[in-house]
Image (cartoon, grey):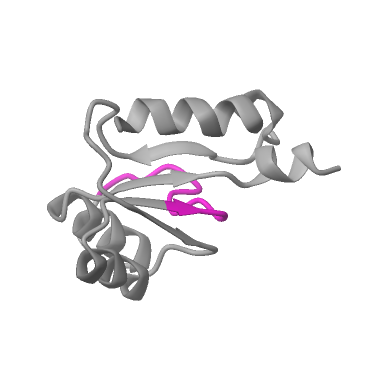
Amino acid sequence: MKLREITAVMEEFAPLSYQESYDNSGLLIGDYDMEVKGILLCIDVTDAVIDEAISLGVNLIISYHPLIFSGLKRVIGDNLVERCVIKAIKSNIAVYSAHTNMDNVFE
């Protein structure tokens, strides 16, 4: 299944228009045309979560909290977010977040 098919289902259930103005839900890392081999769900994307995805052979992480919450000026590995972005891209792992858009579905 293509990543765009999975994101379409996610966004049909919890449209990105439902997210709060400060949020950053949706596809944060990835290529909509990539073939998804497996999905790992988590609350927060961390080095350990990406390592688990790699060890399980999955290439999509769906998180509750967005890995990238505010703008990045550089991606050089100086902090957790930058390290995770680099590791996900190098490992061909897409990252999708459903935060306040998902919250607002259940209110």
Question: Which of the pair 19/62 is nearer the observer?
Answer: 62
Locate residue 103 relative to residue 72 in the image: left or right: right
Where's the C terminus, which quadrant? top right
Q: Looking at the image, is 38 positioned above or below residue 29?
A: below
Residue 26 spot, x, y in % from top left: 49, 36
Where's the N terminus, which quadrant? top left
Query: Does the magenta segment cover residue 69?
Result: yes
Q: Looking at the image, is 106 positioned above or below residue 58?
A: above
Residue 78: tell me if it is visible: no
Q: Main secondary structure of the magenta part?
A: loop
Query: Who's the residue at 29% across and 30% down the image?
Result: 2
Residue 95: tell me if it is visible: yes
Question: Which of the pair 5/44 is nearer the observer?
Answer: 5
- Quadrant of the image occupied by residue 96: top left
Residue 28 spot, x, y in % from top left: 39, 40
Q: Residue furthest left?
A: 90
Residue 25 spot, x, y in % from top left: 54, 39
Q: Looking at the image, is 11 positioned above or below residue 22?
A: above
Locate residue 105 relative to residue 6 in the image: left or right: right
Query: Who's the residue at 38% across and 69% down the image?
Result: 46
Query: Does the magenta segment cover residue 86?
Result: no
Figure label count:
0
Query: Who's the residue at 77% across and 39% down the image?
Result: 104
Query: Who's the residue at 33% across and 75% down the image?
Result: 48
- Quadrant of the image occupied by residue 51: bottom left
Q: Looking at the image, is 39 positioned above or below residue 2?
A: below
Q: Which residue lies furthest to the right in this view?
A: 107
Q: What stretch is highlighted in magenta?
A: 62-74
